[in-house]
């Protein structure tokens, strides 16, 4: 396995921005930029069978499926990339060292700081809890890939249901401190469509109207739909019948690579043995970042 490292990005407050799309750049010793991409054009995703405790019936599963279907419609127009769901799985494990599935799980409780499993950072999968530093994170994606080639091996999504109410209705937006399943609190499809963008190798962009904008507010459903910039980025990266376009080549041809993720949006990098988890999250705009 090649040397890999974690990158952490946060979704910040909205603003007047202008970027079309931005690919995730791997941390390498190469002189050329290496972007993370799938060499295999098929993502098979698996949803933890427990779903979300407070989301009614099985609507969260349908919302996740709809998010992948949104990306599939765009792929069908320009690419041969496919997204397909596998059987739901009990006690699905995700994150570091879990390269057997592209999993999506809801974490219903916070992990305890005094639990012995904290020493090995395994509490999330062991105790089925939210084991990430920032409790104001709504959702987090971990992408494992080679820093030499940028090839993605695995991508997992965790939803912080310990702190946020995930809903699936289309309207009306919930009022602050009055969240319920009959209004839009933190929309499953909104969050998932955004996180799939990270799964396929896209970073946050400075465009408040983009699916990949680094913000999410109470009642937000805007990210359910892929904006034209994100669509263009996907089609340009994974053209039908051709290999993924390298990061440096795309920059030369289309001038769309704007900035490396390193040092952008509060990126924090450190080395891990054997894996590269790429974590990012949605923050409440009504809360200040510590």
Image (cartoon, rainbow, N blue to C red):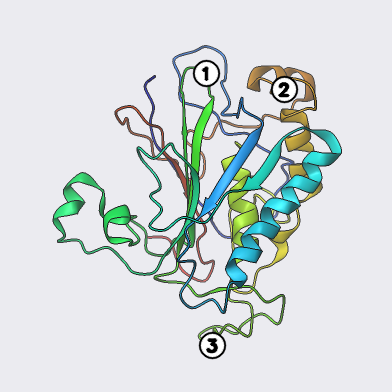
Image location of residue 269, percent across then percent down? 38, 35
- The answer to which of marks 3 and 1 sits earlier in the sequence is 1
Mark 3 sits on what residue?
A: 178
How far, Cα to Cα, is label 3 from label 1? 47 Å
Specify whether residue 203 is in view. Answer: no
Judge by depth and name the residue closer to the eye, 37 or 32.
Answer: 37
Which residue is farthest bottom? 178
Q: Is residue 231 left or right of residue 118?
A: right
Mark 1 sits on what residue?
A: 149
> Which numbered marker is on residue 250?
2
Q: Is residue 148 left or right of residue 1?
A: right
Specify whether residue 5 is in view. Answer: yes
Element on which disc 1 rests: loop
How far, Cα to Cα, is label 1 from label 2? 16 Å
Q: Is residue 220 left or right of residue 12?
A: right
Judge by depth and name the residue closer to the eye, 172 or 73.
Answer: 73
Q: Is residue 109 above or below residue 48?
A: below
Q: Is residue 94 left or right of residue 18?
A: left
Image location of residue 1, percent across then percent down? 37, 20
């Amino acid at each position: 396995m090649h040397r890999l490292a974690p990158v952490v990005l946060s979704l910040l407050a909205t603003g007047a921005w202008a970027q079309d799309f931005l690919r995730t750049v791997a941390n390498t010793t190469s002189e050329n930029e290496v972007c993370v991409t799938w060499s295999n054009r098929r993502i098979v995703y698996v949803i933890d069978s427990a779903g979300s405790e407070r989301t009614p019936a099985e609507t969260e599963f349908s919302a996740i499926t709809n998010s992948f279907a949104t990306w599939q419609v765009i792929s069908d127009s320009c690419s041969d990339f496919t997204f397909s769901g596998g059987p739901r799985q009990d006690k699905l494990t995700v994150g570091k060292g879990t390269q057997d599935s592209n999993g999506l799980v809801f974490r219903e409780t916070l992990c305890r700081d005094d639990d012995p499993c904290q020493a090995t950072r395994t509490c999330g999968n062991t105790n089925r809890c939210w084991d990430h530093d920032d409790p104001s994170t709504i959702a987090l994606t971990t992408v494992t890939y080679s820093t030499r080639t940028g090839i993605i091996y695995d991508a997992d999504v965790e939803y912080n249901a310990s702190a946020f109410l995930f809903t699936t209705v289309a309207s009306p937006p919930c009022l602050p401190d009055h969240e319920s399943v009959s209004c839009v609190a933190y929309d499953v499809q909104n969050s998932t469509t955004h996180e799939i963008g990270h799964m396929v190798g896209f970073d946050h962009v400075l465009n408040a109207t983009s699916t990949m904008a680094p913000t999410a507010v109470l009642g937000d459903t805007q990210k359910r739909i892929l904006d034209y910039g994100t669509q263009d980025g996907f089609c340009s990266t994974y053209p039908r019948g051709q290999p993924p376009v390298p990061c440096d080549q795309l920059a030369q041809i289309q001038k769309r690579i704007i900035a490396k993720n390193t040092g952008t949006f509060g990126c924090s990098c450190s080395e891990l043995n054997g894996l590269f988890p790429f974590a990012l999250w949605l923050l409440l705009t009504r809360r200040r970042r510590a």
